[in-house]
Image (cartoon, grey):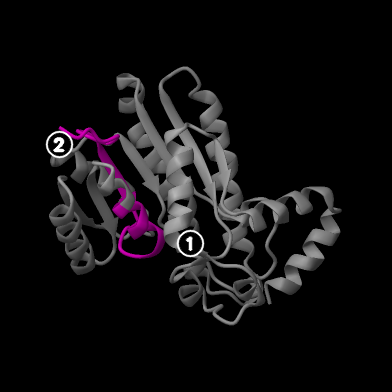
Amino acid sequence: MTSYPGQNQTALITGASSGMGYEFSRLLAQRGFNLVLVARSADRLAEIASELAAAHPIKAEAIAQDLSRPEAAAQLFAEVNRRRLPVDVLVNNAGFGGLGPYADSDWENQREMIQLNVVSLAELTRLVLPEMIRRKSGKILNVGSTGSFAPVPNMAVYGATKAFVLSFSEAISAELQGTGVSVTALCPGVTKTNFFKRAKSENMLLRRLNQMEAGEVARIGYRAMMQGKPRVVSGWFNKIMIASMRLAPRAAVLWVTKRVMR
């Protein structure tokens, strides 16, 4: 009988209806994890759950939830408990950004971005950790960005939320040493997803410089998570860019970033 890494384990993936979330779902299903798929689109989630359950010897459940709402993370966790679904792996993938000067931005959009990218991610992490620690087993993958490493003019709130994801994940990772539970921050650069369409930045220069396939980024994140690494940056181009940021004066980084993010 074939043994899979995720056999008899369950992974909860947020933002599972498209892009990297969908690729994480496929990857985990291939490795034998039962799935709890979370996103706003109930119909799309149901299609993906049926597709993956038919293709692999797993169970896949869909829970439609908009995690940009303040009460959503608690409601999601309550529903997971009601269905008696253990969370062995949590992939906090849901998130979005927006391009433009902060002074011209729509505050409600910025508030939802902070709620989704920061608050719901931190809350779901807090909700699943006690049981993982009790079991002495569990893995959490939080999706950050290359924007986690420097301020991002014209995407100021987005960059700040991703800086939080990296700092938060590395700190919790250190706290959890010796518990059997790990937290990993995945920091991708430009990736072929719907991100730019939602951010209204489809013509941005950075998008045309280097794009990785969502499936490739998901594989890099999965490997790092399974190895218990606190952080991983996807792709050689992104690793070089981040190394350059660290060596360059802060003012120079801001000057370049502001022009790239127009």
Q: Is residue 122 visible?
A: no
Q: Is residue 230 above or below residue 244?
A: above
Secondary element at tag 2: loop
**Front in this rendered view, residue 32 or 110:** 32
In screen coordinates, is 21 left or right of 182? Answer: left
**Residue 135, quarter of picture:** top left
- Residue under label 1, please give it: 113
Q: Position of residue 200 (x, y in %)?
A: 52, 79
- Residue under label 2, please give it: 84
Secondary element at tag 1: helix
Residue at image point 23% right, 67% down:
44
Q: Is residue 190 above or below residue 61?
A: below
**Front in this rendered view, residue 123 or 108:** 123
Q: Separation of disc 1 and disc 2 at Cα?
A: 30 Å
Magenta span contains residue 8: yes
Indicate the quadrant containing the C terminus: top left, top right, bottom left or bottom right: bottom right
**Front in this rendered view, residue 203 or 241:** 241
Q: Which residues fall within the magenta stretch?
A: 1-26
Label 2 sits on what residue type?
Arg
Residue at image point 41% right, 38% down:
140
Q: Position of residue 22 (x, y in %)?
A: 33, 59
Given contact means CB atoms under 8 Å apart, are the residues at marks 1 and 2 in contact?
A: no
